[in-house]
């Protein structure tokens, strides 16, 4: 069948259209477009059915798994598709890796290096035990997240615009530094010993629970990311729908109880809002 | 179809808008009077009371938006009111040294004219159900001049108060403290100045869009 590709303004996007097998899938069409245009790899393509002008309906997005035939309403030999470039894309794995790398590397800088000199403080400082534990806790958390990104999480086909990398990294890296600044500050005031132990203990338990939630979620999908949306069962998912988020929030609460900084609590509050 | 609630709402909003209108009218009147009689150095002292009252009343507008009394989105009113309150309380009221600066005059006059038009516009609509087209035009056109003059005054005043902010340590929170938190007013002020850089063109463009929408809609009617 012949597929005519237009841009959103109506212009023909690929001159002459594309010729595809009658039984071709949308994925095949994406491949053909990629082959022809070189620049637009499949995850950059947003393909929709044309919407009659003036209509306020939302356009139907083509699903990569379906046959092109399913979208033909009548004329089986030709199909018009609207193309939109989503811009450079990165996989979620790449996005998460860079998001988490910042906090992992920047926090120890505040702990090990005499950065506070640049803020006008003398070099000498006493390191409280809680600050050392906080370092281990924090780094373990982000190390765990990176490991999960590569070895545990099963991502669907989805990608993310490149711009999001810069935006998300800016947020994580800035906030990570903001918290690290206060916890490792030369004038840091530690909380009581018991409070510290409760905070970190609770946090570690939540991190382990969080890890187990991720394993459960992973097993819901096949290795190629198939499976779509499913409701997880078992363990904490019997109590809350998004048990992985719940444990994540509580483990940050544990960190904050142990370290007691306004910066940390603000981070937690923003996490709750999102 | 006027239910009791609708009537109450209109009554309340009429009273609110016209009251604040009178406040801003006083600000403008006293500012111009003082300018003529003595000089720009005394403008703040003359307008202080109505200014503080009228500007602080704007906080109610956030409430109105939140509870759905008015249609304005909180997202656009918040930054606007935020910057106003910061200038009024955080700069002018907190650091008396800046009050004699000439930019105070341009600031209050820009604000006052804008608000007089705005509050009377809403006052008309709530009390009488309509506003003449020239009024609509004023409301969506004067910002073309008053936004630049107002923003320049705001930025200028913040900038010129920086030495006073730094010296006074007012509102600063220092370490060590139980909550391991610090706040430096001086750097916060600099950060605020930075926000004006992308913030001002954004607000101006937003108003241009609003203008286009409002004036073309009135043409269609």
Image (tube, rainbow, N blue to C red):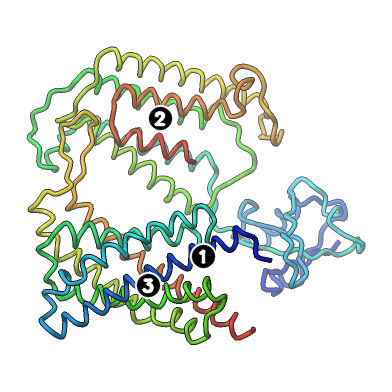
Q: Which residue is mark 3?
A: B21
Report the disc number at residue B11.
Answer: 1
Task: Determine the CA span between mark 3 and mark 1.
Answer: 15 Å
Q: Splitting the image into 4 quarters, where does residue B46 fall?
A: bottom left
Q: Nearer the viewer, residue A162 or A270?
A: A270
Of labels 2 and 3, the one closer to you: 3
Q: Residue at x 78, y 67 (%)?
A: A4
Q: Splitting the image into 4 quarters, where does residue A186 fall?
A: top left
Is the residue at mark 3 from the same chain as the one at mark 1?
A: yes
Label 3, residues with CA under 10 Å away: few <14, some 14-19, many ≥20: many
Q: Which residue is mark 2?
A: A142
Question: Quarter of the image containing the N terminus of chain B?
Answer: bottom right
> What is the chain identity of the residue bearing mark 2?
A
Above or below, A97 against A148 in this view is below
Q: Nearer the viewer, residue A257 or A76?
A: A257
> What is the chain identity of the residue bearing mark 1?
B
Q: Splitting the image into 4 quarters, where does residue B141 fall?
A: bottom left
Task: Judge from the rendering whether residue B25 lies leftward or rightward of residue B204; answer left or right.
Answer: left
Provide the secondary structure element on which disc 1 rests.
helix
Provide the secondary structure element on which disc 2 rests.
helix
Label 1, residues with CA under 10 Å away: few <14, some 14-19, many ≥20: some
Residue A41: x %, y % from top left: 62, 54
Residue furthest out toward the front: B4
Of labels 1 and 2, the one closer to you: 1
Of labels 3 and 1, the one closer to you: 1
Task: Determine the CA span between mark 1 and mark 2.
Answer: 56 Å
Task: Judge from the rendering whether residue B211 lies leftward or rightward of residue A177; answer left or right.
Answer: right
Label 2, residues with CA under 10 Å away: few <14, some 14-19, many ≥20: some
Task: Determine the CA span between mark 2 and mark 3.
Answer: 55 Å
Residue A176: x %, y % from top left: 33, 37
């Amino acid at each position: 069948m012949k597929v005519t590709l237009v841009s959103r303004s109506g212009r023909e996007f690929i001159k002459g259209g594309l010729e595809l097998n009658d039984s071709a899938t949308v994925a095949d069409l994406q491949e053909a477009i990629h082959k022809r245009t070189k620049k637009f790899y499949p995850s950059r393509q947003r393909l929709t059915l044309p919407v009659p002008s003036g209509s306020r309906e939302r356009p139907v997005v083509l699903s990569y798994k379906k046959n092109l035939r399913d979208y033909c309403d009548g004329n089986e030999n030709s199909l018009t598709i609207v193309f939109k470039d989503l811009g450079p894309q990165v996989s979620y794995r790449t996005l998460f890796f860079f998001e988490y790398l910042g906090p992992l590397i920047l926090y120890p800088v505040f702990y090990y290096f005499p950065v506070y000199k640049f803020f006008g403080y003398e070099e000498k400082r006493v390191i409280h035990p809680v600050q050392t534990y906080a370092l281990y806790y924090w780094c373990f958390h982000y190390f765990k997240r990176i490991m999960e990104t590569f070895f545990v999480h099963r991502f669907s086909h989805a990608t993310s615009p490149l711009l999001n990398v810069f935006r998300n990294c800016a947020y994580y890296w800035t906030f990570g530094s903001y918290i690290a600044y206060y916890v490792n500050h030369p004038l840091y005031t530690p909380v009581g010993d018991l409070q510290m132990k409760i905070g970190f203990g609770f946090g570690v338990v939540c991190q382990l629970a969080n890890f187990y939630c991720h394993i459960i979620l992973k097993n819901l999908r096949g290795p190629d990311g198939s499976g779509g949306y499913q409701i997880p069962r078992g363990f904490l998912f019997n109590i809350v729908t998004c048990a992985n988020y719940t444990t994540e929030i509580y483990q940050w609460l544990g960190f904050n109880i142990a370290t007691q900084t306004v910066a940390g609590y603000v981070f937690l509050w923003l996490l709750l809002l999102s | 179809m006027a239910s009791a609630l609708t009537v109450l709402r209109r009554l309340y909003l009429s009273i609110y808008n016209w009251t604040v209108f009178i406040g801003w009218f006083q600000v403008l009147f006293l500012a111009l009077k003082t300018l003529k009689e003595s000089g720009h150095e005394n403008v703040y002292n003359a307008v202080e009371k109505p200014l503080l009252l009228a500007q602080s009343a704007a906080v109610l507008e956030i409430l109105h938006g939140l509870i759905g009394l008015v249609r304005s989105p909180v997202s656009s009113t918040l930054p606007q009111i935020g910057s106003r309150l910061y200038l009024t309380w955080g700069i002018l009221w907190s650091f008396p040294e800046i009050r004699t600066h000439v930019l105070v005059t341009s600031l209050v006059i820009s604000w006052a004219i804008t608000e007089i038009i705005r509050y009377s516009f809403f006052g008309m609509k709530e009390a009488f159900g309509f506003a003449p087209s020239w009024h609509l035009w004023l409301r969506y056109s004067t910002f073309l001049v008053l936004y630049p003059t107002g923003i320049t005054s705001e930025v200028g005043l913040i900038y010129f108060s920086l030495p006073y902010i730094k010296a006074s340590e007012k509102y600063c929170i220092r370490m060590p403290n139980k909550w391991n938190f610090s706040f430096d007013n001086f750097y916060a002020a600099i950060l605020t100045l930075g926000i004006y850089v992308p913030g001002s063109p954004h607000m101006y463009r937003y108003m241009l869009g609003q203008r286009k929408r409002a004036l073309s809609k009135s043409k269609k009617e």
